[in-house]
Amino acid sequence: MEQAMLQMQIAALQAMLGSLGSQFNEFSQSADDSQGQVEAVQTLLANIGLELAQISSDLDDAVTDSVRETIDKLEIAMTKDYKIAVFIRGDYDDREVDEERKKEVLHQAVLAFQDVQERAEAGLKKIADFHAQVVEVQNTQIAPAKDTIKLMIEQNEIELDSVKRQLSEAQQAIETMQTSLTTQSQAVESLQSKIEQSEAASIVSDIGFSILTFGIGNLINDGPLDPFNLHGELDDARRLRDDAQSSLNNANTELAKLTVKQLGLNFRLATQSQIQASLPQLQSTASTTESRCIMLQSQFGLLKDTSSKLLLKVEEVQNGAVIVENTAFTKKEFAEALLEMCSDALIDSRLIDEVQMIKGEIFNEWGGDVPAEIYEAGEMINGKIELLADIPSIKDRL
């Protein structure tokens, strides 16, 4: 009865070991798949970092080029205003005006300020494009990668908990098998001892039996008598012992596999956690780049707004002085418009020379007393120049 119970226990444990072996094989395939996912996420994050670095570098280059070119074009445009100031010098209101020349200098000024506005708009658009790229990286790459790694960690933790339970079950099974092996080994030793004692005790009776039967008894029994079938029990006990030993060996093998599996999961979890820990830095880089784009859009917007305002003003002058017929555009009106443009153009210290050149031409070549309104406008410009003179040009700071 005990042997039957032991056989059932061994069979159950062997079935459990077979299940653990199957699960380990499934894990091996799952581990390969998960490792592929981890490597894919690592590659993705590395590429995102490179992409953000490239966007930041391209953004710097675009801003540098756009600002410098816009200011350069603004300086050129202000020299066209200077030509207007030269055109109205002296007794402009009292002399016959060269209409063709007036149209030409105004037309050249309009074209120049249109060029400024177009370059400013192009620069602002480039910054907006980089801003859109950063937002796209955040929404379509960083956010999904964050969700993916979070899901991978959750799945890994579930699998790790399962392996821990399997390890506990395997260790319990090994303890049971070890007990079974000990029991079977003891049974073998006990039977061997009984057989040795029985054989020693029965030598005399076997000899007597042989004499009485003239040796025929032992021939009939194929040797000395074994009335309790101890040798048969010993064979069964040895088989059960060997089965228990084999099961124990298999169990230790599966335990080793589970231990390897646990180590692999722990390593994979550590790698995944390391990747997850790198995400905040990547998000910070993206957020910083986005903030820079917003700041640069605001700063560059000043150049764009100024260029638009200057273009509008020079177009008003052109409209009033050339396009509208039978309407005289006086020297004072020209001067007021030019000084207003000078004031608006003082957004960078590089424009100071052109502004002073225009203002100096108007005041020095007025041809009489400068009107109070013109004088006040000039003083306002002087105040702006004084504030701006000590501030390095943005071109020099890029």
Image (cartoon, helix red, strand yellow):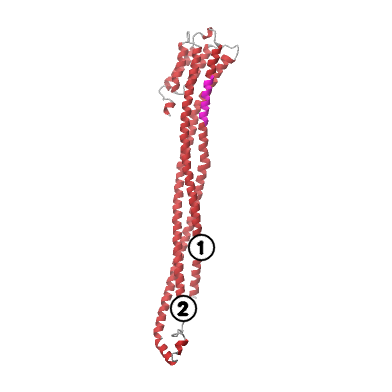
Quick one: 157 or 90, which is closer to the camera?
Answer: 90
Q: Residue 274's spot in the image, x, y percent?
A: 44, 47
Against 63, residue 203 (above or below) is below
* SS category of the residue bearing label 2: helix
- Residue 266 visible to an observer of this rendering: yes
Q: For the point 47% across and 79% down, which residue is it?
A: 232
Residue positioned most to the right: 325
Q: In which quadrant is the C terminus drawn?
A: top left
Quick one: 362 or 220, which is closer to the camera?
Answer: 220
For label 1, the residue is 19
Q: Residue 295's spot in the image, x, y percent?
A: 48, 32
Residue 123 is a magenta residue: yes
Q: Earlier in the sequence, mark 1 or mark 2?
A: 1
Give the main secondary structure, helix, strand or loop, of the magenta stretch. Answer: helix
Against 236, residue 172 (above or below) is above
Against 294, residue 365 (above or below) is above
* Residue 337 marker: none
Residue positioned most to the top: 94
Residue 184 is a magenta residue: no
* Residue 233 marker: 2
Amino acid type, callout 1: Ser
Q: Residue 250's spot in the image, x, y percent?
A: 46, 65
Quick one: 213 or 232, which is closer to the camera?
Answer: 213
Span of residues in magenta: 110-125
Q: Residue 387's spot in the image, x, y percent?
A: 42, 22
* SS category of the residue bearing label 1: helix
